[in-house]
Amino acid sequence: MTDRWDRGRRVPGRTLLVGCGALGTKLGRRLVAEGADVIALRRNTDGLPAEFATIADDLGIPRVRELPAVDSVVITLPPGSAGGGLYRASLTALAQGLPARPSRVVFVSSTRVLEGRAGETPLTEQTPPAPTSVRAQELLDGEVMASELFGACIVRPAGIYGPGRESLIRRVGEHAPVDHTRRTNRIHEDDLVALLHAMLTAGSPPPLIHAVDQAPASLGDVVTFIAERLGVEPPPHLDPETSGGTVLDGSLMREFAGPLEFPSFREGYERMLSETRRRQPR
């Protein structure tokens, strides 16, 4: 870690979590434990922690809004599945509804915006985006808009995994074919929450940062590891295999936020599988 980021020099204050799914909820709980006021805004507020103030709203619906003044905002809205300018509508509504521009806004995007860089390595925050799908282009549009409207810091997570995000474990258990040659990157949800917290509390966080662990790996390496721990045969190879995917450099995240709790898929999936075994009836 280095002092150039002024880590821990800022108090998040009243924080608005826009979207507030599993990721936002975990971050919000941490902020509340530290004494912050947290407001969660999403279409359906059922099931959110009682300690959160809540706003049930769909920012994609045009109307006049009066949102509360806040010091910080974290935006975790997913892109629309078929385009349609979800971010343009939602971010515009957010900017119009807030009485003043918050002092810190963090927009959670995705490393998917680099999908057209397959085969180039390593990809850093200086690598120009290359979206090739509608979803990736909408994410990039959201980044640009969040920067223009709020001066937002951009966080691009790789594939998020952790408790409740166990689709790959299920695929291995089902022996479903996978592309063993595909290059992959990931980040454990707990490490991503720690990064988002650091982005809120640093005096001068990076304007753009990739949330990725320190061990890019082929999908074949990951599923073979999981299969060994499950005591099953590795999934068969997809036919044909493409050797696609990207390799990301996560050095900026480690420089800014410090050592990861789960530096590679091995530690992360080992924890997940151990917890699963503990929950199983004896």
Image (cartoon, helix red, strand yellow):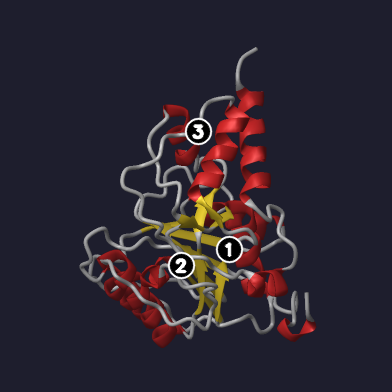
Residue 207 visible (yes or no): yes
- Disc 2 and disc 1: Cα gap in Å? 9 Å
Residue 53 visible (yes or no): no
Mark 2 or mark 3: which comes first in sequence?
2
The amino acid at mark 2 is Thr
Within 10 Å of disc 1 (Cα), the crowding (few <14, some 14-19, many 20+) is many
Q: Residue 150 in the image: x percent, y percent?
A: 45, 83
Q: What residue does disc 1 label?
A: 212
- Disc 3 and disc 1: Cα gap in Å? 25 Å
Q: Residue 85 in the image: x percent, y percent?
A: 24, 71
Q: What residue does disc 3 label?
A: 234
Q: In the depicted view, which residue is nearer to us: 145 or 233?
A: 233
Report the disc number at residue 111: 2
Q: In the depicted view, which residue is nearer to us: 15 or 186?
A: 186
At horizontal 51% and vertical 28% (from top left) the residue drawn is 233
Circle nearer the viewer, 3 or 1: 3
Q: Residue 93 in the image: x percent, y percent?
A: 32, 74
Within 10 Å of disc 3 (Cα), the crowding (few <14, some 14-19, many 20+) is many
